Amino acid sequence: MKLSIVILAAGQGKRMKSDLPKVLQPLAGKPLLAHVIDTARSLSPAAIHVVYGHGGERVRSALDATLAASASRHSWVLQAEQLGTGHAVQQALPALADDELALILYGDVPLIRAETLRTLIAAATDATNGAAMGLLTVMLDDPTGYGRIVRDAQGRVRAIVEQKDANETERGIREGNTGVMAVPVEYLRRWLGNLRNANAQREYYLTDIIAMAVADGVRVVPLVAPIVAEVLGINDKIQLAEVEAENRRLRAHELMTNGVTLIDPARIDVRGSIEVGRDVQIDVNVVFEGQISLGDRVRIGPNCVLRDCRIADDVTINANCVLEDAEVGKGAIVGPFARLRPGTKLGAEVHIGNFVEVKNSSLGEGAKANHLAYVGDATVGARANIGAGTIIANYDGANKHHTTIGDDAHTGSNSVLVAPVTIGAGATVGAGSTITKDVADGALAVARGRQVAIEGWKRPKKTPKK
Ligand code: UD1
Ligand code: CA
């Protein structure tokens, strides 16, 4: 059966007390709704439909690109008035085909895992015992606020009763409705058409379709969520922070499951996707953003931020480094206190030391810039040594220019290389030089005032005050 995913995201989120629509509130640096869309995309559905309402235009413009990036068809479905979850799904019906399976997700339930959804879809599409639908439930110590799952003596699901409509016995049920379900569209269409709002909230409840399924002899296959965190909804900033912490914990556990040593799993933030090799070790307060890959035996010291980086085997990144859109070659050593900016490519065994900034530059195998330097818009050869205090002046106030430094070249301390300029292979730049002309291979360039010594020079004396 083809899969169509409907994401409900029309709620206002009053309790956020924010001008930003609830589903755009960031979790791990990304809007809540983007988490759900990304998970939806990973299931490769035929289509994704987002039901929106409050803050509509803002929500659409924030997420259009994310949706467009998926191979699935997608549509934005307006629910102008929020008349309930059943009413919300109804708005998407014209976009759904009868031979499809509809999977219902929520824009404010961001940690739902693809693995769990696959199990739910499999349950709903297994027709060996007749037509079926899947319902994701959750066991809670305190189910206050949740719809309760009513089962019969055989454990079969009979209905969902909302908290506000539940009697004393029903309120005692600890199994709650997550709201996530997988339903064949041909049934969904029929059942939604029969919804009435004769309940405590005067809403069209999606949950009422469960009793209709039972009446129609369609099996309701329950799946208890394997991880409670994945079905947690977010209504206020407290829950947002709680889910942020849960996300942090889940991502840290994933890393450890993949063999990474975390010095403290509570002090690491993975805000994007990360691939890891064997025997990686990560110290405290490290933040990963975007797409990261770490090779075997990579070590990362405390307080580092890495965004969109490819780090090869045996690299050491020492404390307090910031790396963005950088490629680091095998066995390289970076930091402490180094900054690698976009377009940095470090070859194997390169050393970048403290207070060194590299931008849009490649450094050949074994090159070194160990202290206090700026390397911008440059190609640096193998084994070249950038001395302490070397600055590449790449910007003339209007345009950026390129600098080439040959293999085995050395630049002395406190030298300024004014781009565009080429330092030849094996050339040496004397300390304190301002280099504005190309230096030939093997040459020594010195461009500074000559030292002058004045013998017997007398210091001025203070004139005595009268
Ligand atoms: C709903 C379920 C409840 C379940 C709970 C889980 C119903 C009737 N109840 O209750 O059984 O335990 O979620 O959190 O389904 N939404 C719309 N349009 C609407 C109404 C809601 O898009 O007209 C969206 C909201 O943005 C939200 C989601 O649907 O993402 C759930 O709505 P909410 O009002 O929070 O449902 P609950 O009353 O909590
Ligand atoms: Ca409600």
Image (cartoon, rainbow, N blue to C red):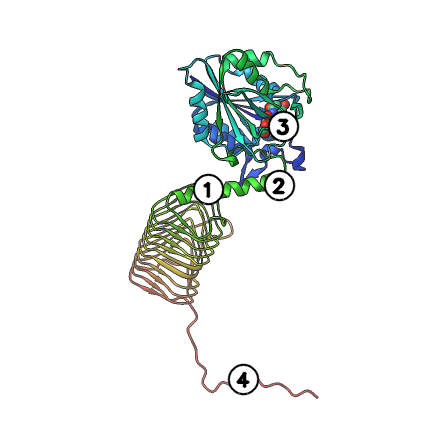
48 above or below 424?
A: above
Q: CA distance from mark 2 to mark 3?
A: 25 Å
333 above or below 201?
A: below
Q: In the image, which disc is placed on residue 8?
A: none
Labels 4, 1: front one: 1
Splitting the image into 4 quarters, where does residue 375 fall?
A: bottom left
Is ligand 1 less than 8 Å from the beta carbon at label 3? no
Left of 44 or right of it: where is 30? right
Residue 277: x percent and y percent?
34, 45
Task: Look at label 1 and name its amino acid.
Answer: Arg
Task: Look at label 3 and name its amino acid.
Answer: Arg
Sooner in the amino-acid sequence: mark 4 or mark 2: 2
Please name the residue shown 32% across and 60% down the image: 409
Q: CA distance from mark 1 to mark 3?
A: 34 Å
Label 2: few (<14), some or many (≥20) within 10 Å? Answer: few
Sooner in the amino-acid sequence: mark 1 or mark 2: 2
Q: In the image, which disc is placed on residue 459?
A: 4
Sooner in the amino-acid sequence: mark 1 or mark 3: 3
Task: Read off the residue under disc 1.
Answer: 251
Label 1: few (<14), some or many (≥20) within 10 Å? Answer: many
Q: CA distance from mark 1 to mark 2?
A: 20 Å
Label 3: few (<14), some or many (≥20) within 10 Å? Answer: many
Please name the residue shown 51% across and 34% down the image: 230
The reply to whether callout 4 and callout 1 are in contact (CB within 8 Å) is no
Secondary structure at numbered mark 2: helix
56 above or below 387?
A: above
